[in-house]
Image: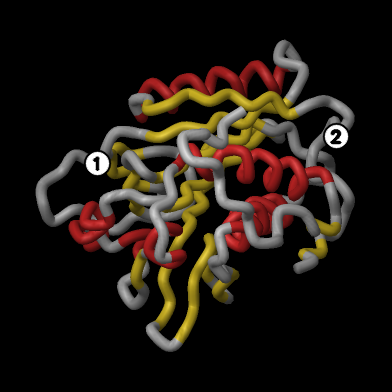
Amino acid sequence: MIIHMPRESIRRDPAAPIEVRHLGIVDYRDTYDRQHALATERAAGTLDHDLLLLLEHPSTYTAGKRTEDSDLPTNGAEVIDVDRGGRITWHGPGQLVGYPIVALAEPLDVVDYVRRVESAMIAVCARFGVTAGRVEGRSGVWVCDDAGERKLGQIGIRVARGVTLHGFALNVNPDMSAFDAIVPCGIADAGVTSLSLESGQEITVDDVLVDIVDAVRAAFDHSDVTRITGPREPAEPGVASVR
């Protein structure tokens, strides 16, 4: 699978490394404040390289700028209003969340950036034997077959002073019932799914970490994303795929 991008790197400084920070399960509000502080530092130049924060959240509903009242939880759960695009979504254990803090190349091309994030998730899905792709007019990563359209990965971003915030969420093996209380991403005519459900095997967030890092780096810095597309070799029992 070759995914063509309009230019080689989306990053302002592709020679600098992308530092990866594995945060574990962390509170949404704390992480919100942390990523905004880091983005401010990156925009000011006091942080001289890009970051990728990888984490899980406790069960949390967040509402983007376009959320409508009809999207909101029917179970009375708290909703956190945030400054990203998109509508309502859920985060929780078993869902891998990635927040790239990246200084984008000029001229800014936010659509290109979103497509690269999608391509990274699509490539990781392929590594686990799941064929995912895009749906015209809808962001994120989807599985489409005779059973219909099911969203596997969500994207909601913000770009401030040329630096990205928020990012992506890949459903690996979460409790899918959490989505039942909302209209996920404001899309009522499609379902949601997970990597474990679609692959027919138990996959954990730890199993995906190495592949998502490689895929994000490849997507951000190469115009032809050809890496991380073949079937994945099974992990050795008892060996976590984390680095």
Q: Is residue 167 visible?
A: no
How many residues crowd around disc 2 within 10 Å: few (fewer than 14), some, or many (20 or more)?
some
Q: Is residue 59 above or below residue 181?
A: above
Observer-nearest residue: 8 or 56? 56
120 versus 11 height, above or below:
below
The percent coordinates of residue 79 (x first, y second) are 24, 41
Q: Is residue 153 left or right of residue 43?
A: left
Return the residue at label 1. Answer: 79
- Side (left or right) of 115 relative to 5: left
Give x and y (percent) for residue 138. 52, 68
- Residue 98 marker: none
Secondary structure, mark 1, is strand
- Amino acid type assigned to the residue bearing label 1 in the image: Val
Q: Secondary structure at mark 2?
A: loop
| Tag of residue 14 | 2
Front position among marks 2 and 1: 2
Q: Amino acid at mark 2?
A: Pro
